[in-house]
Amino acid sequence: MNRNFILGKAKELRKNLTDAEKILWQKVRNRGLGYKFVRQYVFDDKYILDFYCAERKLVIELDGGQHNENIKDKERNEYLKSRGCKILRFWNNDFVNNIEGCLAVIIECLRK
């Protein structure tokens, strides 16, 4: 993928967060969970990650229905895992309806 294109897309996504992404960003920004996270992070000029903690190599994805059984997501996950990343994926609705439960899962993963 063209570097300028993917960087532009990431910038656009940062300006248009979903409700779930806005909530999570409020919780993780400024080391809210004890670790630095960035949003809409461009990984290896190949993928845009919703949230990424480089220190723990933790990727957090908040997804809508378009990601249900998506083969490209499986390929992406395999690539990220091959680079040493851990991936947490939550459905937007599940996250919004159970913020504290999802945050507990994230915190547990950060501590491992």
Image (spheres, rainbow, N blue to C red):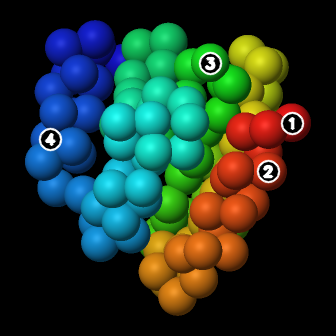
Q: Residue at x 25, y 33 (%)?
A: 10
Do tag 2 and tag 1 residues touch (Cβ < 8 Å)?
Answer: yes
109, above or below 43, in the image: below
Disc 4 marks which amino acid?
A: Glu
Do tag 1 and tag 4 residues touch (Cβ < 8 Å)?
Answer: no
Disc 1 marks which amino acid?
A: Lys
**Mark 4: secondary structure:** helix
- CA separation, marks 1 and 4? 33 Å
Q: Residue at x 54, y 75 (%)?
A: 99
Does 36 sit left or right of 83 as displayed?
A: left
Do tag 1 and tag 3 residues touch (Cβ < 8 Å)?
Answer: no
Residue at the spot of label 4: 12
Quarter of the image where the C terminus is located: top right
Q: For residue 23, what is the image quadrant?
A: bottom left
Does 6 sit left or right of 77 as displayed?
A: left
Q: Residues within 10 Å of mark 3 (few under 14, many from 20)?
A: few
Q: Earlier in the sequence, mark 1 or mark 4?
A: 4
- CA separation, marks 2 and 1? 7 Å
Residue at the spot of label 3: 55
- CA separation, marks 2 and 3? 15 Å
102, above or below 112, in the image: below
**Mark 2: secondary structure:** helix
Q: Mark 2 or mark 4, which is nearer to you?
A: 2
Q: Residue at x 48, y 74 (%)?
A: 92
Q: Position of residue 93 (x, y in %)?
A: 50, 83
Residue at the spot of label 2: 108
Residue at the spot of label 1: 112
- CA separation, marks 3 and 4? 25 Å
Q: Position of residue 98 (x, y in %)?
A: 59, 83
Q: Residue at x 16, y 55 (%)?
A: 16
**Mark 1: secondary structure:** loop
